[in-house]
Amino acid sequence: MRIDILTVIPEIVEGAVNNSILKKAQENNTATIQIHSLREYSEDRFNRIDDYAYSAGAGMVLKIEPVYKAINHLKSQREYDEIIYTSPDGERLTQKISNQLSTYKNIIILCGHYKGIDQRIRDHLVTREISIGDYVLTGGELAAAVIADSVVRLLPGAMGDETSALTDSFQDGLLAPPVYTRPAEFNGWKVPEILLSGNDALIEEWKLQQAIDRTRSLRPDLYKQFDDEQ
Ligand code: ADE
């Protein structure tokens, strides 16, 4: 899978996508993540990419030309399944959306800009708007990194077997059960007896029950959805 991220501040995205699992996924060619600075597409001799809004008091707005040029350049090289704009106005990111995006071959993520972008970009170039939650960030870079992270980790080959994305919280509509490692006792705090029993079937049953109990008490909204679907 290939993800092209268009941004005014590449540095914010770089740290997030060039470490840990996302770095590994790029090294083993599971994913390609290209970060593009919109300034490189500026048609202005001062490399400006924003301008005053027509309406007073709205601040600086990301101009249409550099975005149009960057998207056209990418589209001339390959077909894109989706051109995503990160914005608090968008549909809320869920595991289901990340799962869907992970089946795509090529996507572009256009990072939102603090005072907005020319509406014509959203009307004519963007195919989907995604929010990572009901709060406002200073820019869309962190949101783009969240989307890229949640998608790439799902790709076959991105993670080793022992940390399969299939056992994540939310993947089956439930929070993940608790996990423990050695020692079996620390400070008098013990690992649940069942995990030391060696009985795989009983352990699986226990894990499911823990996941259900945790979801019911910590996220009743998720639990209701899970229960309705049973
Ligand atoms: N840009 C600013 N706030 C955002 C949010 N909550 N989600 C996605 N992009 C954003």
Image: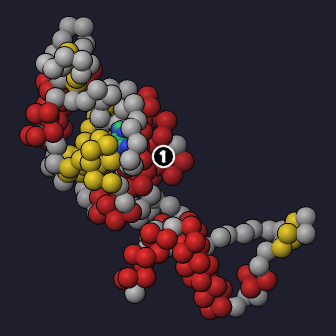
How packed mark 1 is, by other alpha carbons closer than 10 Å (few <14, some 14-19, many 20 or more), is some
- Please state, as top left, top right, bottom left or bottom right, where the C terminus lies in the image: bottom left
- Please state, as top left, top right, bottom left or bottom right, where the N terminus lies in the image: bottom left
Q: Residue 110's spot in the image, x, y percent?
A: 26, 38
Q: Is residue 171 above or below residue 123?
A: below
**Residue 229 falls left or right of residue 120:** right
Q: Residue 67's spot in the image, x, y percent?
A: 18, 30
207, 88: nearer the viewer: 88
Q: Is residue 181 above or below residue 136?
A: below
**Residue 210 falls left or right of residue 76:** right
114, 35: nearer the viewer: 114
The furthest residue to the top = 45
Q: Who's the residue at 24% across and 8% down the image?
A: 46
**Residue 21 falls left or right of residue 91:** right
Q: Who's the residue at 44% across and 57% down the image?
A: 153
Task: Identify the image quadrant of residue 71.
Answer: top left
Q: Who's the residue at 38% across and 47% down the image?
A: 134
Can residue 45 be seen in this snapshot?
yes
Residue at which label 1 appears: 23
Which amino acid does the dot numbered 1 rest on? Lys
